[in-house]
Every structure is written in structure tokens, then in C-alpha cells.
Image (cartoon, rainbow, N blue to C red):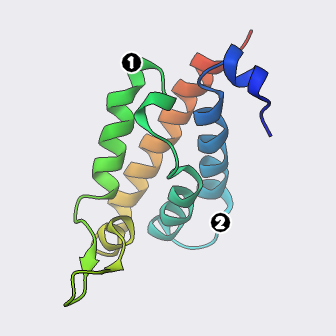
């Protein structure tokens, strides 16, 4: 766990930590790219744009837009039956999910470079 002192010294550390877990899931979890991407999303869905360096916030926003493009699937009462990410991934080709996974990996690399205390 990252201590509060670390987060103060390296404000992008929280985003880096969450994305590192997501990238590990992408690389090691079973299933196709869509299944792994859904699992990876669970690891970083707590992140907000302000967790990122200013120059990467738009990239994070685009990633979230791609993952939530179709919106949630609602029942007759208007309650969410299937979340936006799962619904979007259900309709996505595996090749498209693989491209989004690559985007996530590159975002992780950029955050890591911005976070590296060296």
C-alpha cells in the first residue's frame, strides 16, 4: 500500500498503482481481451481525471469513453441490469478490445514515467 507521504511526493502514485494492477490482469488473467479488459477495469475504475498528470487526463477520458460507449443496459424500471463497460465489451470485437488494452498499457507507461521518483 502506498503511504500518504508517497502520494504527497508523487501525486500520480495512486493512478500508477491502480494501472499497474490493471496491466498485470491484462497480461495474466484467463479469457479473451474483452474478458481481461473487464477484469482490468475493476482494478482502476476508482480513478478520476485528477489522479493523472494534466497532460494525460484527456487520454484517460478517451479510454473511459471507449469502455463505456454503449452505456448501461436498463431493465423496464430503468434500473441498471448490465453496467456500461460490460455492455460495451459484449458488443465489441476482440480485436478492438485488444487495441483498447494496448491504450491502457501505454497510459500506464506514461503515468509510470511521470511518477518515477528518480
Viewer-nearest residue: 33 or 117? 117
Badge 1, how many Cα within 10 Å: few under 14, some, many 20+?
few
Disc 2 element: loop
Residue 116 visible at all: no
Left or right, residue 90 beside residue 78: right
> Which residue shows up at 55% across the image and 60% down it?
42
Q: Is residue 54 left or right of residue 84?
A: right
Numbered badge on residue 29: 2
Which tag, 2 or 1, sits closer to the chain's start? 2
At 35% from the left edge and 68% from the top edge, which residue is drawn? Answer: 89
- Farthest-out residue, bottom: 76
Residue 19, given in percent of the width and then of the height, sits at: 59, 42
User: Residue 55 has which mark?
Assistant: 1
Q: Position of residue 52 (x, y in %)?
A: 48, 27
Residue 59 image position (x, y, % from top left):
35, 32
Can residue 94 be seen here? The reply is: yes
- Could you tell me which quadrant the C terminus lies in? top right
Q: Is residue 78 left or right of residue 50?
A: left
The quadrant in which the N terminus is found is top right
Which percent across, then down, holds residue 116? 68, 17
Q: Is residue 78 above or below residue 102?
A: below
* Location of residue 57 by image quarter: top left
Amino acid at each position: 500500500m502506498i503511504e500518504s507521504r508517497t502520494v504527497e511526493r508523487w501525486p500520480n502514485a495512486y493512478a500508477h498503482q491502480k494501472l499497474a494492477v490493471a496491466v498485470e490482469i491484462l497480461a495474466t488473467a484467463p479469457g479473451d481481451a474483452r474478458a481481461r479488459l473487464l477484469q482490468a477495469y475493476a482494478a482502476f475504475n476508482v480513478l478520476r481525471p485528477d489522479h493523472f498528470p494534466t497532460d494525460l487526463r484527456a487520454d484517460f477520458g478517451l479510454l473511459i469513453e471507449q469502455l463505456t460507449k454503449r452505456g448501461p443496459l436498463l431493465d423496464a424500471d430503468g434500473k441498471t441490469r448490465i453496467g456500461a463497460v460490460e455492455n460495451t465489451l459484449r458488443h465489441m470485437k476482440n480485436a478492438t478490445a485488444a487495441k483498447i488494452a494496448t491504450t491502457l498499457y501505454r497510459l500506464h507507461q506514461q503515468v509510470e514515467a511521470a511518477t518515477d521518483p528518480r
